[in-house]
Image: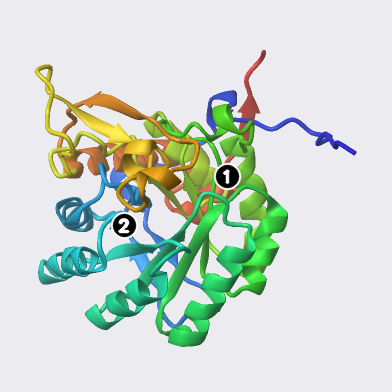
């Protein structure tokens, strides 16, 4: 029998942050640093600006990862390449004395890819599939934890429900990536009817994850810089975005540039991306699309803008840290 959730769910655009009394006299007083840590790993990661570039082939290559690390954020290298290419891209980041996430799927040669990246020095892994609350994710995470123990940090996703967080906790995941169908170039909601409105998803998953000491990464749905503040205020430790960084000069320029100076930004479930890891005969119904986006400022400039927006948001509610921001914040719901 079909079931309807009793309470409404909200996107970022449905809510707003209510201003509060503030003693903050300068944005320079505000510290946006966050810590990714978990009871399941000996590793942790401090990020000055809680933003992660999405592991998409038109967003994050070595240049982007290096630029973000230097700017105080972090990048996630994609998995739509060969194992040797993935290792070389990671090593390029390492040679620049930068840190980054590396990505795995759950099909084909993922164990070989994981082992090769680990041998190259990678320790921060993202297991990245469309529906993370699945037996395929469970088997992959359990293998990784068994193989590498506490010497790696595992981010797993994507999920869209609080009860999926409980499963991730049982599987000994270190951080969960939440959000289904919210990305700018994601068509999951159109093709399948499945979507989890981002603000409510982040809020509910973060409340559950805090019980287990597991950080949440809000992935997708952020269209404005203020959406990052809403996600952090709702409990996310960091926000992953492809849209903010697609078109930056450091992003991989897949397909070249148009006469208008636009570049391709595509979902990793699009046909154009999927054909890189599948034969044409086995391509599923696309759940992503390719669009053109205008060229953006440098990744460093984008990170500075995101940081400035966060600092201002913190100051509006009288907070100088992420902890204070979450303690002080009140959200309002826009009228329909």
Please say whether residue 81 is visible from this viewpoint.
Answer: yes
Q: Residue at position x 25%, y 62% from top? A: 82
Q: Alpha carbon of mark 1 to alpha carbon of mark 2: how far?
A: 19 Å
The location of residue 10, given as percent across then percent down, is: 64, 31
Tag shown at residue 48: 2
- Compared to residue 235, the image places residue 183 above or below, namely above
Residue sitting nearer the eye, 25 or 35:
35
Tag shown at residue 91: none
The location of residue 246, given as percent across then percent down, is: 26, 36
* Colouring scheme applied when the structure was drawn: rainbow
Q: Residue at position x 62%, y 43% from top? A: 201
Tell me the residue that label 1 is attached to. Answer: 234
Q: Residue at position x 38%, y 69% from top? A: 109
The location of residue 209, given as percent across then percent down, is: 63, 61
Examine the image and state in which quarter residue 172 appears.
bottom right
Q: Quadrant of the N terminus?
A: top right
Please say whether residue 26 is visible from this viewpoint.
Answer: no
Residue sitting nearer the eye, 161 or 186:
186
Q: Residue at position x 35%, y 76% from top? A: 112
| In the displayed structure image, the side of residue 158 where residue 68 appears, left or right | left
Q: Quadrant of the C terminus?
A: top right
């Amino acid at each position: 029998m079909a079931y309807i959730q009793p309470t409404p769910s909200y996107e970022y655009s449905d809510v707003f942050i209510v201003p509060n009394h503030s003693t903050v006299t300068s944005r320079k007083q505000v510290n946006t640093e966050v810590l990714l840590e978990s009871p399941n790993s000996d590793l942790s990661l401090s990020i000055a600006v809680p933003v992660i570039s999405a592991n998409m082939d038109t967003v994050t290559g070595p240049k982007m990862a290096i630029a973000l690390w230097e700017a105080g954020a972090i990048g996630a290298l994609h998995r739509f390449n060969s194992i040797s290419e993935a290792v070389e891209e990671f090593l390029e980041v390492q040679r620049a004395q930068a840190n980054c996430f590396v990505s795995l799927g759950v099909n084909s040669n993922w164990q070989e890819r994981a082992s090769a990246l680990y041998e190259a020095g990678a320790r921060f892994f993202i297991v990245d599939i469309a529906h993370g609350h699945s037996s395929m994710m469970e088997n992959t995470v359990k293998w990784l934890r068994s193989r590498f123990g506490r010497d790696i940090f595992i981010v797993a996703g994507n999920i869209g429900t609080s009860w999926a967080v409980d499963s991730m906790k049982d599987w000994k995941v270190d951080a969960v990536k939440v959000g289904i169908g919210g990305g700018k170039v994601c068509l999951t909601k159109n093709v399948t009817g499945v979507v989890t409105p981002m603000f409510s998803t982040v809020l509910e998953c973060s409340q559950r994850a805090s019980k287990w000491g597991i950080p949440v990464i809000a992935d997708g749905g952020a269209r404005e810089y203020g959406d990052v503040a809403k996600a952090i205020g709702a409990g996310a430790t960091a926000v992953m975005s492809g849209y903010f960084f697609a078109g930056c000069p450091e992003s991989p320029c897949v397909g070249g540039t148009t006469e208008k100076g636009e570049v391709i930004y595509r979902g990793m479930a699009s046909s154009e991306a999927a054909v890189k890891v599948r034969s044409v005969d086995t391509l599923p119904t696309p759940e992503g699309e390719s669009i053109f986006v205008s060229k953006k400022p440098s990744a460093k400039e984008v990170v500075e803008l995101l940081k400035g927006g966060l600092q201002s948001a913190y100051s509006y509610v009288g907070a100088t840290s992420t902890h204070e921001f979450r303690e002080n914040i009140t959200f309002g719901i826009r009228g329909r």
